[in-house]
Amino acid sequence: MFSIEVKNLRKEFGKFVAVNNISFNVKSGNIFGFLGANGAGKTTAIKMMSGILEPTLGDALVGGFSIANNPDKVKLNIGYMSQRFSLYNDLSVGENIDFFGGVYGLRGKEFIKRKEWVLDIANLKNQEKILTGSLPGGIKQRLALGTAVIHKPGILFLDEPTSGVDPLSRRSFWELIQNLSSEGVTVLVTTHYLEEAEYCDDIILLDAGEIIADGSANEMKKKYLKNDILEVECSDVIAGLEILEKQNYVEESSVFGNNIHISVNKNFKEQHQIKDLLETTHNIKVKRVHKIVPTLEDVFIHLLEKRKNAK
Ligand SMILES: Nc1ncnc2c1ncn2[C@@H]1O[C@H](COP(=O)(O)OP(=O)(O)O)[C@@H](O)[C@H]1O
Ligand SMILES: [Mg+2]
């Protein structure tokens, strides 16, 4: 069962193509990750799917409603949290919740119940009177999420919900998303933090308006990474990288934290090859070389590099 079915969705701004005929399906109750660098087209796509922005071409069925023919129905049946949150900074917490409750037509007992729920997940119980603008980023984000789902939509669009908050708040925000998903809500979430893909059931990677990879995390690792990935721990990462890049057995290389990751092809024989090269020839101390289980970030770096080189 799919909650979202996107067919050939396209958006042009003048001559510029921001979203280039993308198609994909989102399974009901899944967390679907929409990944890509700034400018990839994530916000444009999410606005079209939310019925806010008219597509140039193509269509999407969101909860059974066509975004092209029935955008108003779509809007009422989804939750949407925009990139800059949708809260009014000059209103109090309670006033913001009242406003969104009103937008979605909540009344009476049901509204009171939902208001309590929003205050609860935002960690703002009994703090209705606080000015929204004065809240810390992480709390504001949780409040924004709460107001976006105050009407209990079955489908939720989140545009970069974790950008600009500290890692701890980011993690607890993902827990909140996972809770909603386990209650059956379908969540489509964009992020430019590639490592957050690990939280998602299915993912697409967007680059310059095009889908360049899709699948679950494990599928992607199998499908797009044929080479082994080695992690090299050495005393001079920058110099080491420069040397390794030139070796015929190295396909790709990147700095990963304090280490180097390289993908090696069939010209690669043994791990002490690298130790010998760096230590004996270049006087760089090598602490460790070992094969690693690739992360999704490795996969994305590989795909984006490949595209860059092909251009
Ligand atoms: N209203 C607009 N008019 C012209 N260009 C736009 C408009 N909105 C977005 N763009 C361009 O479309 C591209 C994709 O933008 P966006 O969807 O915001 O990307 P992302 O959310 O992935 O960062 C960018 O190059 C952006 O400058
Ligand atoms: Mg964006």
Image: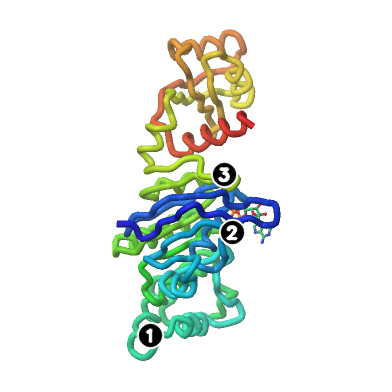
Distance in Å between CA atoms under marks 1 and 2: 38 Å
Color theme of the render: rainbow
Per the image, the residue denoted by label 3 is 207
Per the image, the residue denoted by label 1 is 111
Question: Which quadrant contains ligand 1?
Answer: bottom right
Mark 1 or 3: the one toward you: 3
Q: Is residue 3 above or below residue 234?
A: below
Q: Is residue 25 above or below residue 115?
A: above
Identify the residue at image location x=41%, y=53%.
32
Distance in Å between CA atoms under marks 1 and 3: 41 Å
* Of the pair 310 and 121, the residue shown nearer to us: 310
Per the image, the residue denoted by label 2 is 56
Distance in Å between CA atoms under marks 2 and 3: 19 Å
Q: Position of residue 178 (x, y in %)?
A: 35, 58
Mark 2 or 3: the one toward you: 2
Q: Quadrant of the N terminus?
A: bottom left
